[in-house]
Amino acid sequence: MIDEENKQNDTIEKSDEPKEENQEMIDDSAVQANADANEPADEVTEGAAKPDSPAVDENVSPNPEPETVATETVENTVDSAQLVQMTQQIESLKAQLEERTTQYARLGADFENYRKRMLKEKEELDLQVKQRAITELLPVVDNFERARAQIKPQNDGEMGIHKSYQGVYKLLVDCLKRLGVAPMRPEGKEFDPNLHEAVMREPTDEHPEGTVLEELVRGYYLGERVLRHAMVKVAAPKEDDTSVPEEDTSSSASS
């Protein structure tokens, strides 16, 4: 019995020994595999550390791919199209600016012409109003002049009255002068239908025909404009009393 138990123990121990050897072999193979895996990393590290190896730029590719070239071509085409479009827009804006400038200049000229026209119309209106008002006052001046020509003061009282209304007349005449009113004074001048109105004709051989002999109603200027035409008497040729009538001449010729 004892011998059989010893044999069994020996058998068990022998069976355990190969297991231990197998375990050691497995451990050795794992270590060898790790060493083999680490060797390439070391070699790469050593290669990068060598100073003689040339540096490689990852951003620059010596041989560009066709896709990159096509992309650059498309970008250049797009840039050219944008440049043409921007050029057209600039030309259009220049044309619009010139048009607006021309319109502004034309508008300024129209406004200046309008301003001048309105100023001229205002001056014309003021002159018409002034002319109308002064024309209404001219009969008063005429009456003062008739009174001065006809009234002959006989005593001191009449002379005082004469001087008083003559002072009023002088004041009125001075006011008219300040407004630009001036008398015509046509005596001795040639008759002008633009200035004078002939109401009488007097035959005379002392003055040429058409000469103004007398101013019956005084005419006036307002600036360079005729305020009122002068009513005048004009010289006419004197008739010859010795001239034979045409009827007598014709009857004598028939006889």
Image (cartoon, grey):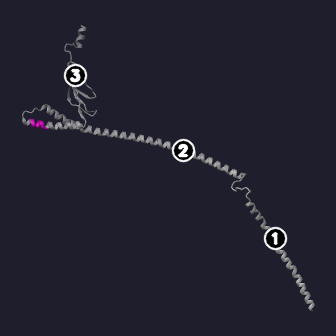
Cα–Cα span, label 1 and label 3: 158 Å
The residue drawn where x is 66% and y is 50% is 74
SS at mark 1 in the image? helix
Q: Which mark is residue 32?
A: 1
Lower position in the chain sequence, tag 1 or tag 2: 1
Cα–Cα span, label 1 and label 2: 81 Å
Pointers 1 and 3 in contact (CB under 8 A)? no
Lateral position of residue 60 relative to residue 197, left or right: right
Indicate which label's residue lies in the foreground, 1 or 3. Answer: 1
Cα–Cα span, label 2 and label 3: 79 Å
The residue drawn where x is 42% and y is 42% is 108
Lateral position of residue 45 relative to residue 184, left or right: right
Q: Amino acid at mark 1?
A: Gln
Q: Which mark is residue 235?
A: 3
Is 162 a magenta residue?
A: yes
- Give the extent of the magenta segment: 159-164
